[in-house]
Amino acid sequence: MKVKLLVFIYVLTTVFSFAQPKWKQTESVKEVKLELFHATQTANFPTTESLDEGSWMYEISHRFSTPINDGIDALYGFDGPARIRFSLGYGITDDLMVNFG
């Protein structure tokens, strides 16, 4: 029984002696690009974000124009005319983009 206990302790000490704390491990640090918004438009308003260099973006947006107070006859604003917008954008550089539409 004593031999088994000594072997068990020996195995545990050798296994843990090879482990290194996380703070001693060296990993390559990835530089994360700060993005305040995830798109060039949020709620139909432009944001400060631009497309990356060489990136394309195609966007379809629409707004329903029937008022909600028309009730169930107009399906609470969803069954009526809508303003539809199609746009195509291209990132010339990381800080400059062109958007048509």
Image (cartoon, helix red, strand yellow):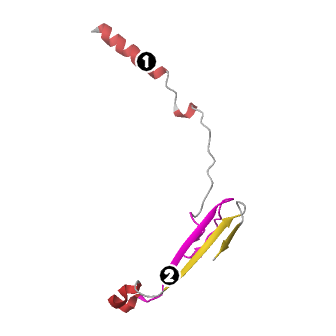
Mark 2 Cα-neighbour bin, 10 Å: few <14, some 14–19, many ≥20:
few
Indicate the secondary structure of the residue bearing disc 2.
Answer: strand
* Coordinates of residue 63 in the picture (x, y in percent): 50, 81
Q: Which mark is residue 63?
A: 2
Indicate the secondary structure of the residue bearing disc 1.
Answer: helix
Q: Nearer the viewer, residue 15 or 73?
A: 73
Residue 64 drawn in magenta: yes
Q: Is residue 14 above or below residue 55?
A: above
* Coordinates of residue 12 in the picture (x, y in percent): 40, 19
Magenta stretch, residue numbers: 38-67
* Coordinates of residue 85 in the picture (x, y in percent): 56, 79
> What's the residue type where badge 2 is placed?
Arg
- Count of numbered circles on the image: 2
Q: Is residue 34 above or below residue 79?
A: above
Q: Nearer the viewer, mark 1 or mark 2?
A: 2
Residue sitting farthest toward the top: 3
Q: Which residue is mark 1?
A: 13
* Coordinates of residue 90 in the picture (x, y in percent): 67, 66
Q: Nearer the viewer, residue 47 or 13?
A: 47
Residue 35 drawn in magenta: no
Q: Is residue 68 above or below residue 50?
A: below
Q: Residue at x 40, y 13 (%)?
A: 10
Classify residue 32 as left or right of residue 84. right
